[in-house]
Image (cartoon, rainbow, N blue to C red):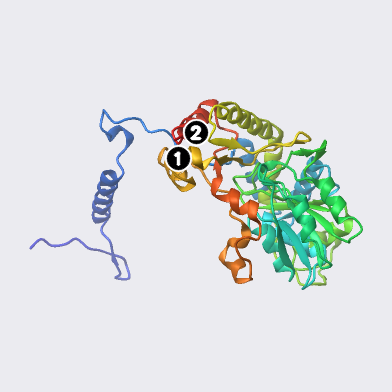
Amino acid sequence: MRKSAVLKSKDGAVAEQPKTRRRDARALHAVLEQAYPRKSDAPANAAPSKPFLPYGRQQIDEADIQAVIETLSSDWLTTGPMVAKFEKAFAQFCGCAEGVAVNSGTAALHAAMRALRLQPGDEVIVPAITFAASANAAIYEGASPVFADVEADTLLIDVESAAERITAKTRAIVAVDYGGQPADYDALRRIARNKNIAIVEDACHAPGATYKGRLAGSLADIACFSFHPVKHLTTCEGGMSVTDVPEYAAHMRRFRNHGIDSDARKRESEGTFAYDMVELGYNYRLSDVQCALGLSQLNRLPQWIARRRQVAAWYDDMLRDLPHVRPLRVHADRTNAYHLYVVRFDLAAMRGDRREAFGALRAAGIGANVHYSPVYLHSYYRQRGFQPGYCPVAEAVYPQMLTLPLFPAMTQADVARVVEALAALKR
């Protein structure tokens, strides 16, 4: 019987033999090679596969990486100087006086609800078609979301429906700039006038968009943005609330820091240790490292928005010959920042339904998606008493909606590939 070689340390502990480790590593490598062959190992006659097109994708360059490295090498990783620099620069981009950086778009919405001092029993009107956070933020503060219907051809909040939902309990309207197109803020102001109703702009889709020449972010009492990787610029995760009201900004800064009246950098500069927690807040802070990334990305935001509009223009042009696919309408008094490119299907002119269309595009390596189901039809909201039929337009449009890939690195050939796949769905 062959004697096994064993290595022992000075204290007698058994150590694994190096040759055994190498043999095990080679065996594992062989298994992985068989399971995941290299491209060169593929059959010579195999058809080349096209790269997968996600519906969104971030862009990180060397300047971004360097900005992060420099901040990692600094004395402040969080609550430091990069936070204030990013806040000031992004607020200026939006045409606003104040910016409050937080760790997500959801946190930005929550901070806005707190700054408005919502109370249990208050109501907040929200469009039916949006991400759940637009409505959830009101619940965090004890208020109740009330859903307004949407315009069928834009998916923006329907102002007439919102007006019908106003009651004596209404304290705010959250308007979502769906896909990147601002809502009708002048009309919303008219229905809120003299009723102590604040307007909050959920602009997570819309940095750089305009409404009657005014920038997204400057259209409401408070506006909220997201810096998730699929958005226009990223801080990995992050968000910001912007406003022209100093009291709102001060409240949101305190709220993001546990409700404490100062942060570590302020206490450092003042040479004090004392602080006071004046209300119950949360840890919604965004780090200096993330703000350094966001500040670097902000330098390229205008060119990325221009590129998104170019990609959307290619879609508009190529889809004109497909009667079963209708892009959303853009109002003449607005410009769209195109976070999303959403189409509606004429299902009667198609082979199959939206689910089959989604599957066909995914099978072709195209990352279609759906944004969003009516919020009140989620299980949580049904448990709160909402039922189908509450917003009939949103429910009618939802089965027709599909989000197509759109990000700055896309080419005209990428768009043609998507349109070709859509053309194949025609009956």
Provide the secondary structure element on which disc 2 rests. helix
Q: In this rendering, is residue 403 above or below 245?
A: above
Q: Kindly identify which numbered label has been placed on residue 361.
A: 1
**Residue at 45 percent of width and 38 percent of height:** 52
Mark 1: secondary structure: helix
Residue 264, visible in the rendered structure: no
Tell me, yes or no, whether the two marked residues, 2 and 1, touch with CB atoms within 8 Å: yes
Viewport quadrant of the N terminus: bottom left
Marks 2 and 1, how far apart in space? 8 Å
Q: Work out which residue is located at the far front of the displayed protein and give it.
A: 348
Earlier sequence position, callout 2 versus callout 1: 1
Give the residue type that dot 1 points to: Leu
Residue 86 as seen in the image, left or right of residue 387: right
Horizontal arrangement in the rendering, residue 373 relative to residue 292 (left or right): left
Give the image quarter of residue 380.
Answer: bottom right
Judge left or right: residue 171 versus residue 179.
Answer: right
**Three-letter residue code for mark 2:** Val
Tell me the residue that label 2 is attached to: 418
